[in-house]
Amino acid sequence: MTIFRGSFLDTPADPFTGGALRAEEDGAVVVHDGVVAARGTYAELRAVHPDDDVVDLTGGVVLPGFVDTHVHFPQVRAIGGLGMPLLDWLEQCALPEEARLADTTYAEGVATDFVRGLVGAGTTTALVFGSHFAGAVDALFAEADRVGLRVTSGLVLSDRLLRADLLTDPDRAVAESVALASRWHGAGRSRYAVTPRFSLSCTDDMLAACAEVLAAVPGAMLTSHVNENPREVEGVRELHGCDYVTSYDRHGLVGAATVLAHDVHPTDQELALLGVRGAAVAHCPTSNAALGSGLFPLARHRANGVRVALGSDVGAGTGFSLLKEGLQAYFAQQLLGDAGVPLSPPHLLHLATAAGADALGLGDQVGDFSVGRRFDAQWIRPAPGTPLDVGLTHAASPGDALARVFALGTPADVRGVWIDGVPVTRPDDAVAEAGSPLLVG
């Protein structure tokens, strides 16, 4: 048994349906074999466990590890390509970099950068858009497994419109995908996701191949893009003769294990179909803003029962931090006025944690600090004298403190990350000056 002491904030009950922020300002979580065995005040739990080790995380706040529901592994070195809409950005920034991952040695370096970026931002679970190259996907899974990150990912599949070195054919797509799944699906914390890039770059034969892989890998997920940019949406309609969601659904690719990214420009019929199928949407607000894709219609998704969580969408997104994504999501809904959904700090935390866990089928394992959950956590402890440190010092309540974390927090403020109760980052000397985790008997 290990006792973690600190100010714990989480949202086990959905704030969108009346749930509130749960806060223990001098709280404690008892962790046994990576699982939360008890939670309450520090005084109560220390009295019950007088001899167990204590990890002192007082100062700052302890949040559940973030769950990123849409992030591109090959694009970490392409972040910052501003000033272009989606299809131009793909052609000029993303796809040339993705082609470089044909070199597995290069891909291994990218995997190291990518996993470090996620964990450094407090993300412990991610649905990752993999690479078009099987060797690169192996490199991603291997690095995530080495660090301990919970990753769901897979081979990216396309057979038209992209540059030739990123294309495959349906038979090869099935063979390579099933082979990757046989190595990684269910190995450690890894799971497989069937990943058509988008139906714009997939023929019906390729989408049928995706359905074949999905059937061959029990428990696999399906992830892709949908309704991100008007030009893209129109291209899908011209090529498939139907709306974007239907282009996937008629191949059996839309269900409870489906996460589609963006959905900025859905029709009412598509939203109704997503709701009926139980699919989830990854909302990627900094990417939507950077590419000029539009403002996400959260209210329409909620009205149709469509599950929504946050994605960073690196590299069109502007970094790995879901704090930034939460803040941008707040801005977008404010800009929509009466058509938007007013978002409070608990809403933002829920979108970044428990909602993502639910979208990935992991809601009974991670996303909050309830008894029985895996202890995936991050300690946000700003350096002394920084605006966030000042803000937290003068916060009037836990909710006020959480608002300041989303408004001011960055990966530099993440002082420690734990997955299954095991630290996966350790404070350096500079962090130690701000207060590193202290183990006391």
Image (cartoon, grey):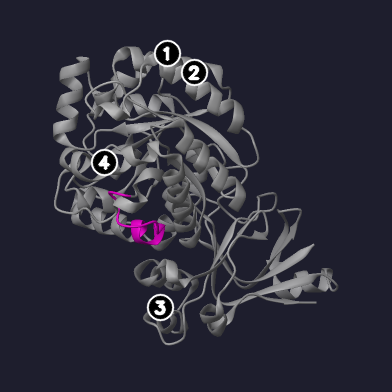
Please report the bounds of the magenta region as a residue range.
Answer: 315-326
List x then y, in percent, for residue 3.
73, 67
> How many C-alpha atoms fall within 10 Å of the one at disc 4: few (<14), some, or many (≥20)?
some
> How many C-alpha atoms fall within 10 Å of the one at disc 1: few (<14), some, or many (≥20)?
few
Mark pair 2, 3: CA separation: 50 Å
List x then y, in percent, for residue 374.
66, 51
> Which of the two discs, 4 and 3, sits closer to the camera?
4
> Which of the two discs, 4 and 1, sits closer to the camera?
4
Q: Mark 4 and 1 residues: CB-CB less than 8 Å, in contact? A: no
Mark closer to the chain start, 3 or 1: 1
Q: Mark 4 and 2 residues: CB-CB less than 8 Å, in contact? A: no
Mark closer to the chain start, 2 or 3: 2
Mark closer to the chain start, 4 or 3: 4
Q: Mark 1 and 2 residues: CB-CB less than 8 Å, in contact? A: yes
> 174 or 308, which is in the foreground?
174
Residue hosting label 3:
388
Q: Is residue 397 above or below residue 71?
A: below
Q: Is residue 362 above or below residue 386?
A: above
Mark pair 4, 1: CA separation: 25 Å
Q: Could you tell me which residue is drawn at 24 percent across and 39 percent down?
A: 264
Can residue 52 be found in the magenta stretch?
no
Residue hosting label 1:
171
Residue hosting label 2:
175
In the rendered view, does 389 fall on the left or right side of 371? left
